[in-house]
Image (cartoon, rainbow, N blue to C red):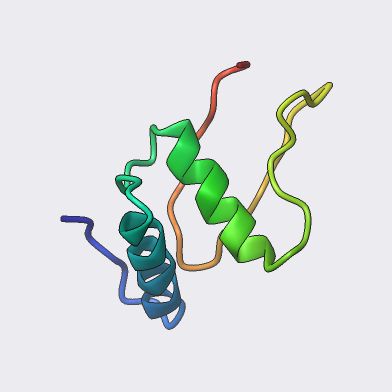
Amino acid sequence: MPVYSASKDAPKKQQLDDWIAAEGTARKLDDPVYLKKLILRCADGGAGVADHAAGLQFFIVQGGGEGFLGDG
């Protein structure tokens, strides 16, 4: 079970995680599928993770955690 911070944004992050889990994706910060879905939901229709970016992509999820995806 994930542990959430006491920040005012944590309930929003937990709701996003619940939606992602309902789609069948585990809440793991080392899972590229989870991170991409989290960023896409946070973007609210905006830009998500590009699959073939030329350089580093950096996203901030308020109330969230930190995770890194490999080159692939």
Quadrant into which the N terminus falls: bottom left
In the image, what residue occupies the spot 43% across and 83% down?
Answer: 8
> Would residue 53 appear left or right of 24 to someone viewing this image?
right
Q: Residue furthest right?
A: 54
Q: In this view, does 56 lie above or below 24?
A: above
The quadrant of the image that shows the C terminus is: top right
42 relative to 55 in the view: left or right: left
Residue 9: x, y in percent?
46, 77
Q: Nearer the viewer, residue 66 or 14?
A: 14
Farthest-out residue, bottom: 8
- Would you identify the image quadrant in which residue 70 lies? top right
Query: Which residue corresponds to the image point at 22% horizontal and 60% vertical from the top-left?
Result: 3
The image shows a total of numbered marks equal to 0
* Identity of the residue furthest to the top in this view: 72
Q: In this view, does 48 lie above or below 45?
A: above
The residue closer to the viewer here, 37 or 10, is 37
- Above/below status of 7 relative to 50: below
Asked if residue 67 can be seen in this view, the reply is no
**In the depicted view, which residue is nearer to us: 63 or 48?**
48
View extreme (left): residue: 1
The quadrant in which residue 16 appears is: bottom left
In percent of width and height, residue 7 lies at 39, 77
Residue that appears at 38% across and 41% down:
29
Residue 61 is situated, as x and y percent measured from the top left of the image, at 56, 60
Residue at image coords 37%, 62% = 17
Q: Can residue 15 be seen in this view?
A: yes
> x%, y% of residue 65?
43, 52
